[in-house]
């Protein structure tokens, strides 16, 4: 894997060093949802996208498939999920079987940057909490748009810098745009804003953080020489949650390709 891809993969999972990559499946083993709220995504699709048996949804950087599987189970539509972590794809396949929606789900282990060159004509494309893995915001939109059919929808879980707040306060280093900058990009790319939801309201970050901290302690006991990176991971998770609660505005945008 290219160094840049590895670095972005680590960053998408809030890890400050690629040294953590082999340990992330262990650290995150107690979490199924890794970013977006499945309930919110299902609700938006149900509300705006006329679903039928032919409807096809693509979930790029699908993690362990929490969003895709909930969509398949609630709306009885076909979903394709792509993620770079083989352990996450394995978990997604297992969950789809457990919930008896495996016939509706296809999970592929691979780079979303490559999937956008082959996956085409989707009714809905989800890009949830995956940050800059597809490049700059403009590159991200260009790549995502290749996979959505005209009139189809894009669902993005993002965070923006609220007016007047400075990036100096942000703890987990990541370049955020303002809402206005995003809106201009949507317009320039022929995307109409259909709905915007604040996306972290009511989310219980504490229980996720506790679960990760316990797994980090187990890893420290096994690999004491790596204590600093495991402690660093627990700290980055706390910092990211603090950013989401206080310093940036987390949103889910539903957009239509005109
Ligand atoms: C914060 S998680 C979000 C997962 C999922 N969308 C969700 O909301 O539950 C970010 C995901 O991006 C995946 N990822 C990072 N780089 C990727 C790439 N180049 N191609 C595909 N997936 C990637 C990670 O493995 C991780 O599962």
Image (cartoon, helix red, strand yellow):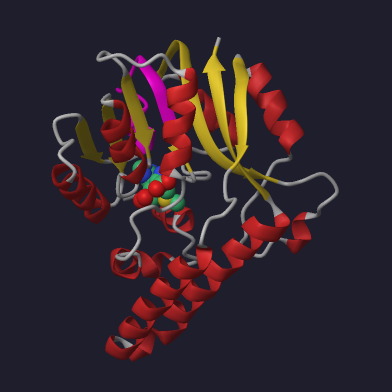
Name of the residue lying farthest toward the right: 164
Percent across and percent down for residue 184 are: 72, 24
Picture quadrant where residue 252 is located: top right
Q: Residue at x 44, y 25 (%)?
A: 45
- Vertical placement of 217 versus 104: above or below? below
Percent across and percent down for residue 107 are: 22, 38
Q: Residue at x 48, y 74 (%)?
A: 234
Percent across and percent down for residue 147 are: 39, 21
Does any portion of residue 49 appear in the rendered image?
A: yes
Residue 170 versus residue 55: which sits nearer the camera? Answer: 55
Determine if the magenta segment contains residue 119.
yes
Determine if the magenta segment contains residue 121.
yes
Q: Residue at x 44, y 18 (%)?
A: 49
Quarter of the figure with the C terminus? top right
Percent across and percent down for residue 229 are: 44, 78
Residue 22 versus residue 216: which sits nearer the camera? Answer: 216
- Vertical placement of 183 versus 234: above or below? above
Picture quadrant where residue 68 is located: top left
> Residues in magenta?
112-126
Q: Residue at x 34, y 77 (%)?
A: 215
In this rendering, position of residue 140 left or right of residue 222: right
- Vertical placement of 129 versus 118: above or below? below
Does any portion of residue 144 appear in the rendered image?
A: no
In this rendering, position of residue 82 left or right of residue 125: left
């Amino acid at each position: 894997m290219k160094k840049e891809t590895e670095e972005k993969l680590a960053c998408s999972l809030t890890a400050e060093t690629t040294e953590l990559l082999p340990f992330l499946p262990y650290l995150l083993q107690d979490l199924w949802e890794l970013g977006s709220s499945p309930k919110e995504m299902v609700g938006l699709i149900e509300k705006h996208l006329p679903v039928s048996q032919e409807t096809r949804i693509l979930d790029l950087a699908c993690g362990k498939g929490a969003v895709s599987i909930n969509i398949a189970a609630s709306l009885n539509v076909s979903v394709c999920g792509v993620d770079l972590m083989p352990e996450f794809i394995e978990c997604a396949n297992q969950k789809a079987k457990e919930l008896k929606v495996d016939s509706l789900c296809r999970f592929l282990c691979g780079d979303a940057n490559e999937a956008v060159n082959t996956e085409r004509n989707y009714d809905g494309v989800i890009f949830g909490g995956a940050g800059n893995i597809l490049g700059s915001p403009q590159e991200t939109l260009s790549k995502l748009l290749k996979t959505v059919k005209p009139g189809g929808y894009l669902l993005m879980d993002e965070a923006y810098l609220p007016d007047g707040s400075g990036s100096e306060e942000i703890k987990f280093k990541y370049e955020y745009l303002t809402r206005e900058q995003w809106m201009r990009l949507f317009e320039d790319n022929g995307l109409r804003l259909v709905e915007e939801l604040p996306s972290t309201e009511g989310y219980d970050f504490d229980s996720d953080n506790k679960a990760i901290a316990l797994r980090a302690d187990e890893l420290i006991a096994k690999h004491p020489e790596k204590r600093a990176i495991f402690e660093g991971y627990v700290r980055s998770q706390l910092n990211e949650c603090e950013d989401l609660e206080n310093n940036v505005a987390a949103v889910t945008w539903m957009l239509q390709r005109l």
